[in-house]
Amino acid sequence: MKTQRLQRFINGALLSAAALCVHAQSAAPSTIVLGTTAPFTGAFAEYGEEYRKGADACLAEINAAGGVRGRPIAIRYLDDGYEAARTTANARALAAQGVVGFVNLVGTGPLVQLAPLLDELKLPVFGMSSGAAQLRERQPGSRWLFHTKASYTDEFTGFAQVLPTIGMTRLVVVAQDNAFGKAGADSARSAFKAVGIEAPIVQLKSGDEGLQAAVDETQRAQPQVVVLAVAGAAAPAFIDKYQQAAGAAARVAVLSVVGGRLLTDKLHERARGIMTSLVYPSPWSGGRRVAREYQAAMKKSGQPLSMLSLEGCVNLRFAVEALKAAGDEINGPGLQRAAHRGLQLDLGDYALRLAPGGQVASTYTSLGIYRADGRVSE
C-alpha cells in the first residue's frame, strides 16, 4: 500500500510539473519573424549589408522596449546576390519558415520578378531599394508592396527643378544596362522633358570596354552635369574614369540609391561636390529627430553611419508600425489589411504617412552635397 501511495504521489508530481512546463511554454512570448532576401555577396552587397546594419541596430532598441505587445521581433536573412531567381526562391523559403512579411528588399529586377509571387505567398513587403515606377503601378502582386520613399521619377523631378536654377541645363543621363538603369532612364527622360530639357541617355554596359565607351560618349556631349542612374560598383568606377577624363569640368549628380560608402570608399576626397538626391534626411543631421534616434542606435551597435543603414532602420520601424496596427492578426494578410487601413510613423519633422488604400508612404526629396569626409550635407 505504501508503495502504491508513493507511486501515486510521484505520478501526481510529474503531472503537476508537466502542467507547469506547458503553462510556462504557452505564457512565453513567441517571436515575430520578418524576412529579408537581399544581396550580401557580389557587386551590390553593400545594399544588403548596410540595410542589415541599420535594421538590426534599430531592432535592438525596439526589442529592448518590449517589442510588439511583449513579443520580440527577429529578422531572418538570406543572400540572393541580386539575382532574381534566387530572390524568388529565397522568398518561398522564408515563407515556408513562417515569416509574416518582408522588409528591406533590394533591386528593381528582383522585385519585378517577386511581385507576382506575393499574391501566392500572401506576404507584404515594407521598404525596398527600388524607386522604379513599374513597381508602383497596378500589376499582379503590387498591392502587397509598400513603398517608404520617393520614386525615381520624384528624384529626377527634383533634379529637373533644381539644376536649371544653378545654371545647369546641358546634361547627360548615364543609365546602367539593366532593369534599374532602364527604369531610371525612363523616369529621367520624362522629368527633364517636363521642364523643356532634352537629356540624351548614355547606356553604361558592363566590363571595361563598356565603361570606357560610356565615358567617351558622355565627354563628347560636353555636359555641364552628368546625372547617374547607375548603382553598385559601376557608379564609382564611372565617376572615377569620367573625372580623370573631364577634369575640373566633371560635375555629377546621383540618385539616392547610387550613393553610399561604396562611392566614398572608392573616391575618397574626390567625392566632394557630388550632388545627390536625398529621399530621407541626412543621417549626419543633428537637427532632425529621425537622424538623432538612428545615430543613438548605431552608436550602441558600434556601427558607422550611412545613408543606406538609415534607410534600413526607417524601413524596419515602418514594418513594426504595421505589426502594431495588425493587433491579433500578425500574419501576412493581417499586415496587409493594417497597412491598407492607413499607417503613420511620426519621426518629428519627418514622417511616413500611408493613406488608406495607398502604397506610397513618402515622396520626400531634397538635394544633398557630398563632403570630402564622405558625409552628405543638406
Image (spheres, grey):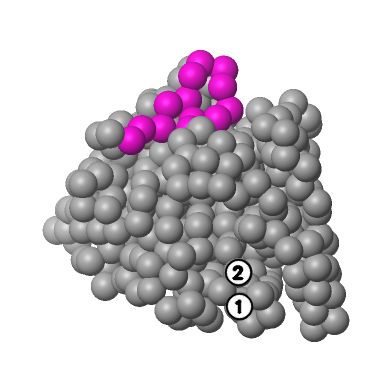
Left or right: where 49 falls relative to 8: right
Give coordinates of residue 115: x percent, y percent. Answer: 73, 41
Tell me the residue at 67%/32% (across/down). Answer: 195
Tell me the residue at 36%/33% (across/down). Answer: 351
The CA span between labels 2 and 1 is 6 Å
Left or right: where 343 falls relative to 102: left
Callout 2 crowding tier (Cα within 10 Å): few <14, some 14–19, many ≥20: many
Residue type marked 2: Ala
Tell me the residue at 64%/82% (across/down). Answer: 244
Q: Which residue occupies the foreground of this view, 165 or 253?
A: 165
Give coordinates of residue 180: x percent, y percent. Answer: 73, 54
Give coordinates of residue 89: x percent, y percent. Answer: 74, 58
Q: Secondary structure at mark 1?
A: helix
Left or right: where 238 falls relative to 274: right
Task: Tell me: residue 311, above or below residue 194.
Answer: below
Residue 151, label in figure: none
Q: Are marks 2 and 1 in contact (CB under 8 Å)?
A: yes
Give coordinates of residue 107: x percent, y percent. Answer: 67, 55
Question: Which quadrant, please, contains the N terminus?
Answer: bottom left
Q: Which residue occupies the foreground of this view, 246 or 252?
A: 246
Left or right: where 265 falls relative to 12: right
Residue behind mark 2: 250
Report the span colored magenta: 350-362
Residue behind mark 1: 247
Q: Secondary structure at mark 2?
A: loop
Task: Tell me: residue 165, above or below residue 255.
Answer: above
Principal secondary structure, stretch drawn in magenta:
loop
| Res. 31 visible in picture | no
Among all residues in the image, which is located at the extreme left?
Answer: 2
Tell me the residue at 38%/27% (across/down). Answer: 344
Callout 1 crowding tier (Cα within 10 Å): few <14, some 14–19, many ≥20: few
Residue type marked 1: Gly
